[in-house]
Amino acid sequence: MKTCFLPQKRRCPGLRAMVLAAMSISSVSAYATLGGDSSSVNADQSALGAAITTQADKNYADNILMLPDGSVVHELVNVSGKVFEITWNSRAHRPDMEQLLGSYVSRFNGTGKHHHNPTAHQAKRADADLVIVSNRVHRQFSGVAYLPALLPDNTTGPVSVASEVKK
């Protein structure tokens, strides 16, 4: 059996491919939040270092993430087990939007048809498959992102949840 040492790159041609594959798999699972399944809530909790509580309704579960800095994030999961809405409320900065929005973060950041700066006082995007509203008022950041196709029955817009920043 051949021994593989990292300083000798030519002896381990498959190692680089295996490391890159592992990194791509872990990055996909880490950013499966909006539109992802309910297990992505636990991934967000771990990645953000948050405490979590859950409040159940007949049409959805509200997973409330309390971040160490006092920020509050709500991740709403429908009866099919999909995250259909995320709200955030934070002082001084937004939570990790890449972690929360996953593949939708590029649309939040202004690519494609979205021409608003997400650090401006208000940024809105309303597409058929994604709605995002982000606000900043006096260093207070809040917002909502939801997927209309995944909303619970008899719901036409975002679910209203209390989202206070803890002091």
Image (tube, rainbow, N blue to C red):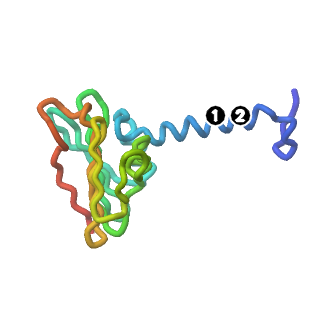
Visible in this render: residue 107? yes
Looking at the rendered image, the quarter that the C terminus falls into is bottom left
Mark 1 burial class by Cα count in 10 Å: few <14, some 14-19, many 20+: few
Is the Cβ of the residue at disc 2 closer than 8 Å to that at disc 1?
A: yes
User: Residue drawn 31% across and 67% down?
Assistant: 91
- Specify whether residue 87 is in view: no
Mark 2 neighbour class, 10 Å CA radius: few under 14, some 14 to 19, many 20 or more: few
In the rendered structure, find residue 21 and report the number of the disc placed on it. Answer: 1
**Where is 133 relative to 42, above or below?**
below
Q: Is residue 103 left or right of residue 154?
A: right
Quadrant into which the N terminus falls: top right
Which residue was labeled with disc 2?
A: 17
Three-letter code for the amino acid on which mark 1 is drawn: Ala
Tell me where residue 86 appears, x and y as whole percent. 29, 46
Q: Point out residue 72 in the picture as x, y percentages from the top left corner.
A: 29, 57
Q: Secondary structure at mark 2?
A: helix
Q: Position of residue 166 (x, y in %)?
A: 26, 64
Calculate the distance from the C-alpha at mark 2 to the C-alpha at mark 1: 6 Å
Residue 120, by quadrant, is bottom left
